[in-house]
Image (cartoon, grey):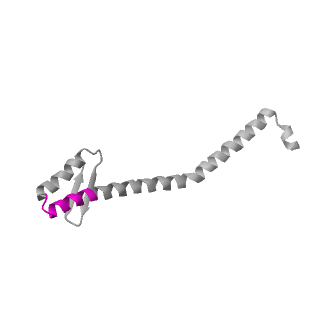
Amino acid sequence: MQFLRNFSIFQRLLMILGVVALGLMLLSLTSLPQQFSSLEQQQYEKTKNLVENTFGIIEHFYDLQQSGELSQEQAQKQPLMLFQSSATTLTITIGSMTTIQIW
């Protein structure tokens, strides 16, 4: 403690602030990978939910077409009308032949 008496109060205050700032930077740097991982997981879940919901809607209209309630043309156009109001662009490929682009 005698060592610190060689410094003025202002210098001691600056040292304390420096140690606190260094500690906060270290804490921030150690939490960055966890924050990045969390954001990445949230984006994955968001995309997964969007694809599952879109596929569910398409599947519903496909079932209506298979049961004869809708023609093939109606079953293709009605989901697109639903999706055109969306601000999301999504391209879905089901199997190797069917590609649906949603705006």
When the figure is inspected, residue 8 is found, relative to residue 2, above or below; the finding is above
When the figure is inspected, residue 88 is found, relative to residue 51, above or below; the finding is above
Query: Which region is colored magenta?
Result: 55-69
Residue 54 placement, left or right of 39:
left
Number of labels in the image equals 0
Q: Residue furthest right?
A: 2
Question: Toward the viewer: 31 or 9?
Answer: 31
Question: Toward the viewer: 45 or 27?
Answer: 45
Q: Main secondary structure of the magenta part?
A: helix
The residue located at (60%, 53%) in the rendering is: 30
Q: Quadrant of the N terminus?
A: top right
The residue located at (52%, 52%) in the rendering is: 35
Q: Quadrant of residue 66?
A: bottom left
Residue 74 placement, left or right of 46:
left
Residue 16 placement, left or right of 31:
right
What percent of the width, then of the height, locates residue 15?
A: 74, 40
The residue located at (63%, 49%) in the rendering is: 26
Q: Quadrant of residue 71?
A: bottom left
What percent of the width, then of the height, locates residue 78?
A: 18, 51
When the figure is inspected, residue 3 is found, relative to residue 78, above or below; the finding is above
- The reply to whether the magenta stretch includes residue 95 is no
Question: Toward the viewer: 80 or 92?
Answer: 80
Q: Quadrant of residue 24?
A: top right
- The reply to whether the magenta stretch includes residue 61 is yes
The residue located at (13%, 54%) in the rendering is: 74
Question: Toward the viewer: 21 or 84?
Answer: 84
What percent of the width, then of the height, locates residue 13?
A: 76, 36
